[in-house]
Image (spheres, helix red, strand yellow):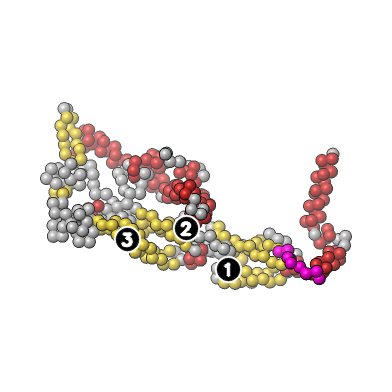
Amino acid sequence: MSKRDYYEVLGVAKDASEREIKKAYKRLAMKYHPDRTDGDEALAEKFKEISEAYEILTDSQKRAAYDQYGHAGVDPNQGGAGFGGGADFGDIFGDMFGDIFGGGGRRQSRAQRGADLRYNLELTLEEAVRGKNVEIKVPTWVSCEPCGGSGAKKGTSPKSCPTCHGSGQVQMRQGFFAVQQTCPTCSGRGQVISDPCNSCHGQGRVEKSKTLSVKVPAGVDTGDRIRLAGEGEAGQFGAPAGDLYVQVNVREHPIFVRDGNNLYCEVPIGFTSAALGGEIEVPTLDGRAKLKIPNETQTGKMFRMRGKGVQSVRSGSVGDLICKVIVETPVKLTEHQKELLRELEESMGDSNAKHKPKEKGFFDGVKNFFDDLRG
């Protein structure tokens, strides 16, 4: 099945900025993350597709390759330059013409850098805001210790291939053409191992789970990546290791919703406090804080508490906490309490327009609407 266009997957334009791509990813990741889809396999696959698109489009080199060559430019199974190494397009065309016209003896195959890896790290909002050191276990290929990654038994070393004499290629004559091909003896490496290491059986690397310490900086958010250089898969035959990318996902919080560096929360208050005003306690990530409520406050009113948000991991600026007031209607009233409310209503008399301006404005609008209908 052919892959969908990465820009289409994230719902962004082809010239979208990195900020727009991150914002789109954050919105989709919150919707399709496995923690929120109850094991739905179709939605889990969609989350993988979204993550793959985000990973490519936020890497400048991979995005450039994708823009120029499509999925072939970033898929190692199609010869692209994505995760896992692989030759770039210059190598592909160079090898093609080198095989036909001689190529000047350039080696066709080289020991390749190890594959990059990705680790998904789940954090609470508090951990993401404050930062922390975490230990993670990563199954990967690591350099073989007994042979030092060479693949040869300790005390020996790889030798130059007797067939290609170290070039990695052999030349064959076909009529008027000299055709170069990968050396069948050394598979293009230019070296052979006559006495392979007993631990890695000549590969120069072994499978192992390693424990790494990751320093998560304060202020990270869903979609951010932490790069650990050289902590990916070890390359074969002593080639350099790839990198490990720690992908951050911040779990949903029971009180706060984060948007960039700002935090949002809903604060319920009684209608008496809304009418008369007063001071209430609200939660912040640093503990409780006092919030002054003016009299005649209506439900939905927003209050900004400056500097109570999140410190940006990049600029160091601090966001705000936005509290949305929700006025609660009292429930389970006694007869006496109901009677008091009736007395309050009666005491307002015909002056409801003064005490309830929105109500009067609404019903005046309704009346005008039906008058217009009757024409």
Q: Are marks 3 and 2 in contact (CB under 8 Å)?
A: no
**Mark before the other along the chain sequence, 3 or 2:** 3
Q: Which label sits in the foreground, 3 or 2?
A: 3
Residue lying furthest top in this view?
A: 175
Question: Residue tagged by mark 3?
Answer: 209
Residue 204 horizontal/vertical position (percent): 22, 55
SS type, badge 3: strand
Identify residue for label 1. Answer: 284
Q: Magenta segment, which residues?
A: 328-336
Q: Residue furthest left?
A: 162
Residue placed at 23% from the left, 42% from the top?
A: 108
Q: Is residue 352 left or right of residue 56?
A: right
Which numbered mark, 3 or 1, is in the foreground of this view? Answer: 3
Q: Earlier in the sequence, mark 3 or mark 1?
A: 3
Q: Label 2: which residue?
A: 249
* The magenta stretch spans residue 331: yes
Q: Is residue 254 magenta?
A: no
Assess whether mark 2 and mark 1 are in contact (beta carbons under 8 angstroms): no
How busy is the neighbourhood of tag 3: few (under 14 within 10 Å), some, or many (20 plus)? few
Q: Residue at x 44, y 49 (%)?
A: 48
Q: Is residue 245 left or right of residue 16?
A: left
Residue, x 22% and y 35% (percent of image)?
A: 99
Q: Where's residue 27, x and y in %? A: 53, 52
Question: Please, what is the three-letter code of the amino acid marked with disc 1?
Answer: Thr
